[in-house]
Image (cartoon, rainbow, N blue to C red):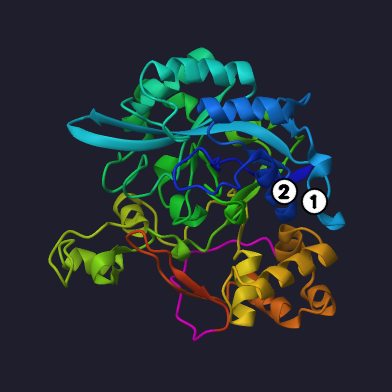
Amino acid sequence: MRFIADLHIHSRYSRATSKDMSPEGIWRAARQKGISVIGTGDFTHPGWIAELREKTEPADNGLFRLKEAGHVALPASCRGETFFLLSAEISCIYRKNGRTRKVHCLLFVPGLPEAERVASALSKIGNLSSDGRPILGLDAKDLLSILLDTSPSGMLVPAHAWTPHFSVFGAASGFDSIEECFEDLTSHIHAIETGLSSDPPMNRRLSRLDPFRLISNSDAHSPSKIGREANIFDTEISFPAIMQSIKGTGLAGTIEFFPEEGKYHYDGHRACDICLPPEETITRNGLCPVCGKKMTIGVMHRVEELADRPEGFMPDDMPPFHSLIPLVEIIAETRKAGVNTKAVKKDYLALIDTLGSEFAILIDLPADEIARAGFPVVAEAIGRMRAGDVSVSPGYDGEYGKISLFGPKKERPAKGQRLLF
């Protein structure tokens, strides 16, 4: 069975997160998007795990159902079942090999007893109540060891692996290989999360990543961001099947941002409005041409540093992927209006009410069917997106890139994208 899963989000117990990230709000957004499995996020937080215990119930597949799903208002076209998978993100900050490391890690576990054992062990190291994504003075390798001891069928995946400041390969605080980070426990690492600022072809330029699967998730802090990146599985819907797919069989593809839209794609200095490609940063010795301070080194630069394959390389067995723009952003551009305006929200609800979930519209439906539903300009925009006919001003130093389907075209760097259309 083919289905879509977004396994990395945050609850309302995380900092800078919408109050609408409740079990009901998360479930509703997942159904509207067309997501069958959604991560819970934040299972180490005592308040969130108590709310999950109250509002969800175990299914017979290692996942969880929303108890009162029938009371959540949804268009008939989006009704169905979405399961929760227990997930959490841990921020590990520690010294290793003479440097301060800041590595974010995703944890997946199959049940509440396992989640509570993990949380109990971590509570001895730091305060789990202060943030849904706790900051712990803990080596990422030791976090993996704790997970293996408390939930042997669980999994750890390095989160947003290229983000400059908080990731396993980050330019500011990361490592040059998975092995350098996890040492003798590397065999228990089966995948990395690519993050918004990189895509599969960028990652596959590193032969050292060949043993690892590439997964993509939204890292959503609000319902509207759920599914901005996600995974396509072709297996049964269960915790063991999803974990086995991540280990090597059943991952049918991923849903991606256009990576230039990610907020750390290029190098730059936001305070001076400076955005540079890697080659220009190198000529300037990494210093801002305006103020002379050190710039934030972006994901593309870091990939170039570690890559041992040319740009455009793609292994024959690499799963295909979709590079998508969220439907609400497409509608906003066609209307020349903000994504939060009443007109855009009205069109979004009309589209999913008439045609089905957001991913059905963005991926599956023929453009002429979208046009016949009364949205010809949206249909044209989706056709351009599917063809990769977009213009992007790359993101940098925490600033999201700007993407356009109808504006003046700017040449996008060739990335050898393999799309599923």
**Image point 36% across, 39% down: which residue?**
168
**237 in magenta:** no
Marks 2/1 in contact by CB < 8 Å: the verdict is yes
Indicate the position of residue 383 as horizontal and vertical percent values: 68, 75
User: Is residue 180 depicted above or below 421 in this figure?
Assistant: above
User: Is residue 2 depicted above or below 198 in this figure?
Assistant: above
**Image point 47% across, 50% down: which residue?**
195
On residue 73, the disc is 1
Indicate the position of residue 231 as horizontal and vertical percent values: 63, 47
What crowding class fits label 1: few (fewer than 14 Cα within 10 Å), some (14-19), or many (20 or more)? few
Image quadrant in which the N terminus is located: top right
In the rendered structure, which segment of residues is drawn in magenta?
Answer: 407-421
- Nearer the observer: mark 2 or 1; the answer is 1
- In terms of secondary structure, what is the magenta stretch mainly? loop
User: Is residue 120 depicted above or below 175 in this figure?
Assistant: above
Q: Amino acid at mark 2?
A: Arg
Indicate the position of residue 3 as horizontal and vertical percent values: 74, 45
Q: Secondary structure at mark 2?
A: helix
Q: Is residue 266 left or right of residue 46?
A: left
Image quadrant in which the C terminus is located: bottom right
Q: Amino acid at mark 1?
A: Ala
Indicate the position of residue 178 as horizontal and vertical percent values: 38, 35
Q: Residue furthest left?
A: 292
Which label's residue is closer to the chain start, 2 or 1?
Answer: 2
**Image point 49% across, 86% down: which residue?**
408
On residue 28, the disc is 2
Q: Is residue 384 left or right of residue 397?
A: right
Q: Secondary structure at mark 1?
A: loop
